[in-house]
Image: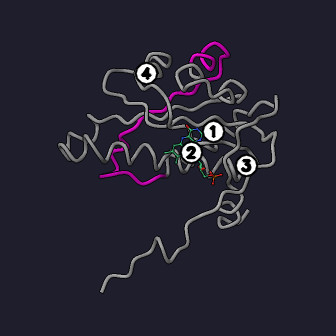
Amino acid sequence: MDIFDVFSARHSIRAFTDQPVTEEAMRKIFETLNRAPSAGNLQAFDIYQVTKAEHKEALMRASYDQGFLVQAPVVLVFCATSARSAVRYNERGETLYCIQDATIACTYAMLAATALGLGCVWVGAFDEEAVHQVIGAEPGQRPVAMLPIGYPNETPRIRPRRALEEIVHQVG
Ligand SMILES: Cc1cc2nc3c(=O)[nH]c(=O)nc-3n(C[C@H](O)[C@H](O)[C@H](O)COP(=O)(O)O)c2cc1C
């Protein structure tokens, strides 16, 4: 797929088949997200891969019962690791860059998954403390996004977008 076809093909998928995601596909997703830009190339994020049913169930409970988290064969949890960025960028690194680093990586992962014929959805609604505990994250690693990944078992609803004229502002 051409990259613009990938952008067009990506829609949130919230139903997954039982088909497992191969290690090779996951490797491709990890290699792709590892190409993402980050502030000072510090890559101030860590990722936890969740595949066990008991852990996925706990993630579902931590995200207000979003059931598709259990259905997906793999859930990635993206954590912002503030200390990595704060070393060079102080408060801006600690409060902003690390979150941007983690979420750009998550975006790359979404697009890589789409290019591989997989489906996923960004999950942002969850209890951070509960997710932190489920994945056994280290202190200072803040869960900022979860990405359930699997083969789509639904035709996605195509969501409308704001008009470009409303979004893009010409200066001067
Ligand atoms: C920051 C963020 C948080 C989101 N949180 C959730 C979520 O908790 N649960 C969910 O089902 N979708 C969530 N989404 C997915 C959005 O609902 C979805 O991207 C949006 O409706 C546009 O649809 P599309 O992804 O199919 O283009 C989130 C997306 C973003 C970017």
User: What distance separates the C-alpha of mark 3 from that of mark 4?
Assistant: 29 Å
Q: Earlier in the sequence, mark 3 or mark 2?
A: 2
Q: Residue furthest top?
A: 54
10 Å crowding of disc 1: few (<14), some (14-19), many (20+): few
Q: Earlier in the sequence, mark 4 or mark 1?
A: 1
> Is the CB of mark 3 within 8 Å of ligand 1?
no
Q: Which residue is mark 3?
A: 116
Q: Which residue is mark 2?
A: 31
Residue 74 percent across, percent down from the top left: 66, 29
> Residue at image x 42%, y 54%?
37
Q: Which disc, if any, is residue 132?
A: 4
User: What distance separates the C-alpha of mark 3 from that of mark 2?
Assistant: 13 Å
> Residue at image x 45%, y 46%?
103
Q: Quadrant of residue 25?
A: top right
Q: Quadrant of the N terminus?
A: bottom right
User: What distance separates the C-alpha of mark 2 from that of mark 4?
Assistant: 24 Å
